[in-house]
Amino acid sequence: MPPPDGRDATYDDLRAYPEKMHAEIIDGRVVVSAESPLPRHSKAQGALVYFIAGPFEHEHGFGGPGGWWIFTDVDVQFGNHVVRPDLAGWRRERLPEPNDRPITVTPDWIAEIISPSNEAHDRVTKRRLYAEQGVPHYWIVDPEARTLEALTLEAGRWVDAGSFDESASARVAPFAAVELPVARLFLPRTAGDAAR
């Protein structure tokens, strides 16, 4: 919702919301998530941190090249938009000191994890916004479908860089130096999964 005086929302307006509330500014309006993430969302986020941040974030990387900052749920400002991606990554040479809030440098990679309440927001609104802002790599993880979609920005348009289900072990840009076991992003299957 916009501020009561009719102006576009600012970062100060966003900071008035409780810290634990997932609030963003899109097109001058505050957008608040309706529910807390489900465990399957948290599992996917944690697994991506493990498989991506481990090898890529640390100075020399654990089994990878290092050279990145990988953050979860950090505020990123694009002009009058402020988003809080599930994960965002910057090459360290582009973001030498990540101490500001919000971060105003465009990420080199963003991953969003689909929840039932935010699917259209991530697949439509944020996908459009990230392309407009020049984010080079966008991953969409769907814990219910158990898939990973990787998109690469080329000439302002998203190009499919690969779609993977849980049977895949994938090398996906910009982190193709390590193999990502897609099934490990998701909670183990249960008896109820077979009925779906």
Image: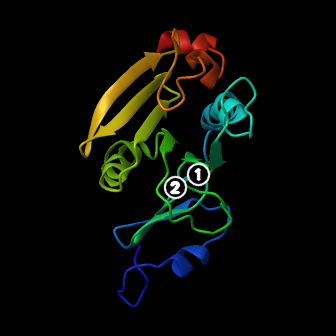
Element on which disc 2 rests: loop
Q: Is residue 136 above or below residue 48?
A: below
For this orientation, the residue located farthest to the bottom is: 5
Q: Residue at x 65, y 30 (%)?
A: 65
For disc 2, the neighbor class at 10 Å (few under 14, some 14 to 19, many from 20) is few
Residue 166: image location, x then y, percent: 52, 14
| 136 lies above or below 103 | above
**Residue 154, horizontal then vertical, whole percent:** 28, 39
Q: CA distance from mark 1 to mark 2?
A: 36 Å
Q: Quadrant of the N terminus?
A: bottom left
Residue type marked 1: Glu
**Residue to which mark 1 is pinned:** 93
Question: Helix, strand, or loop for circle 1?
Answer: loop
Give the image's coloring scheme. Answer: rainbow
Task: Give above or below for 84 relative to 65.
Answer: below
Please name the residue that numbered disc 2 is placed on: 34
- Residue visible at 69% across and 30% down in the picture: 55
The answer to which quarter of the image holds residue 64 is top right
Asked whether residue 186 is in view, the answer is no
Q: Amino acid type of disc 2? A: Ala
